[in-house]
Image (spheres, rainbow, N blue to C red):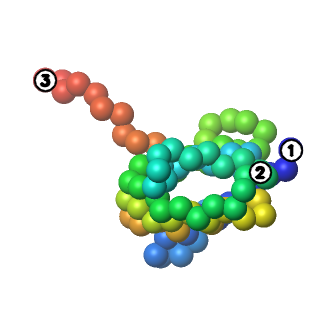
Amino acid sequence: MADIEVELVATAGKLWSGTARMVSAKAGEGEIGILAGHEPVLSVLQPGEVRVFPVGGGEPKRWQVEGGFLSFDSNHLTIVADNVIEGARPATSPATH
């Protein structure tokens, strides 16, 4: 199976680029998953998590975004995101006293 070339860009410039086997994000109509060979798509991003699943497995890279858009064509995905925070969504934990 082919890989996806991914670029994550914010207003400050390129945040990350590399290859992935799959990328998922919260798009305009709900959660979208992009695999190599996916039909071309241009979509608005909703606030939520972008996950880039590495080639060969392992834990995905994660970013929280406040919006933006994604564009996919010919196994190249560009994500232009607003207000990006790298890492997983913080887990909520009960208050301790």
| Residue matched to label 1 | 1
Foreground mark, 1 or 3, reads 1
The residue type indicated by label 3 comes to His
Give the residue drawn at x 38%, y 59%. Answer: 66
Label 2: how many Cα within 10 Å (few below 14, some 14–19, many 20+): many
Position of residue 41 measured from the top left corner of the image (x, y, whole percent): 63, 61
User: Is residue 72 found left or right of 91 in the rendered image?
Assistant: right
Compared with residue 36, is residue 84 higher up or lower down, i.e. above or below? below
Give the residue drawn at x 61%, y 45%. Answer: 33
Position of residue 57 measured from the top left corner of the image (x, y, whole percent): 73, 36
Position of residue 60 measured from the top left corner of the image (x, y, whole percent): 61, 42
The residue type indicated by label 1 comes to Met
C-alpha gap between disc 2 and disc 3: 49 Å
Residue 97: give its label: 3
User: Is residue 31 found left or right of 60 in the rendered image?
Assistant: left
Label 1 with label 2: CB-CB less than 8 Å: yes
User: Is residue 51 found left or right of 56 in the rendered image?
Assistant: left
Foreground mark, 2 or 3, reads 2
Give the residue drawn at x 72%, y 64%. Answer: 73
Label 3: how many Cα within 10 Å (few below 14, some 14–19, many 20+): few
Return the residue found at the far left.
Answer: 97
